[in-house]
Amino acid sequence: MNTAAGILSLIVLATTSLAPACSHGNASNASHAGSITSIRSMSLTRAAHTATLLPDGKVLIAGGFAGDENSLASAEVFDPVQATFTSIANMSVSRAGQSATLLPNGKVLIAGGYNGDYLASAELYDPSARTFTPANTMVTPRAFSSRTRCRHFT
């Protein structure tokens, strides 16, 4: 199994496990919740990217490595109902190994990562506008770390 197919299968498994009523476009597939089903490929091969479940059930896939040491600024959204990937606006900087945290307001905070240098930059993804905007910079650059959403942070 190639890397892209493995990553894609994990996305399908995660989205069907979290949304068991997901029908992938027809009711006959609803009984396969939690199983791995082959669908379309992402627009690019990615590794060390993030996949964030959005409030509407879609999945934001951002950044990563392009199968080599080159990091990506590109992003796409997976729609489990239509079983499609849609390219969206690029992040302001290419990054792999970044963190992505869904905030209470529905936006996604993307922070840190690596693109030849460790990054302190951050940006917000707005699902309604399908755009990224710069956010405050972290004090210390970091990659391959985790984030925890604070209760008071919106």
Image (tube, rainbow, N blue to C red):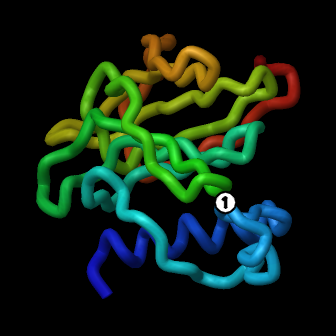
Counting from the top left corner in percent of width and height, residue 83 is at 55, 58
Q: Which is nearer the eye, 140 or 50?
A: 50
Q: What residue appears at the point 49 percent right and 52 percent down from the top-left corner? A: 84
How many marks do you count on the picture? 1
Q: Is residue 127 left or right of residue 151?
A: left
Res 18 visible: yes
Question: In the figure, is residue 87 to the left or right of 129?
Answer: left
- The residue that appears at 66% across and 47% down in the rendered structure is 53
Horizontal side of residue 139 vs 3, given as left or right: right
Amino acid under disc 1:
Gly
Q: Position of residue 114 (x, y in %)?
A: 27, 42
At mark 1, the secondary structure is loop
Above/below status of 71 relative to 120: below
Residue closest to the far bottom? 1
User: Residue 60, percent across and down?
Assistant: 54, 42
Please tell me which residue lies in front, 38 or 61: 38
Position of 138 relative to 84 (above/below)? above
- Quarter of the image containing the N terminus? bottom left
Quadrant occupied by the C terminus: top right
Q: Picture quarter containing residue 113?
A: top left
In the image, taking residue 45 as reference, residue 83 lies left or right, namely right
- In this rendering, is residue 124 above or below 149? above
Q: Residue at x 24, y 41 (%)?
A: 72
The residue carrying mark 1 is: 25
Which sits in the foreground, 22 or 68?
Answer: 22
Viewer-nearest residue: 11 or 25: 25
Residue 142 visible? no
Residue 50: x %, y % from top left: 48, 50
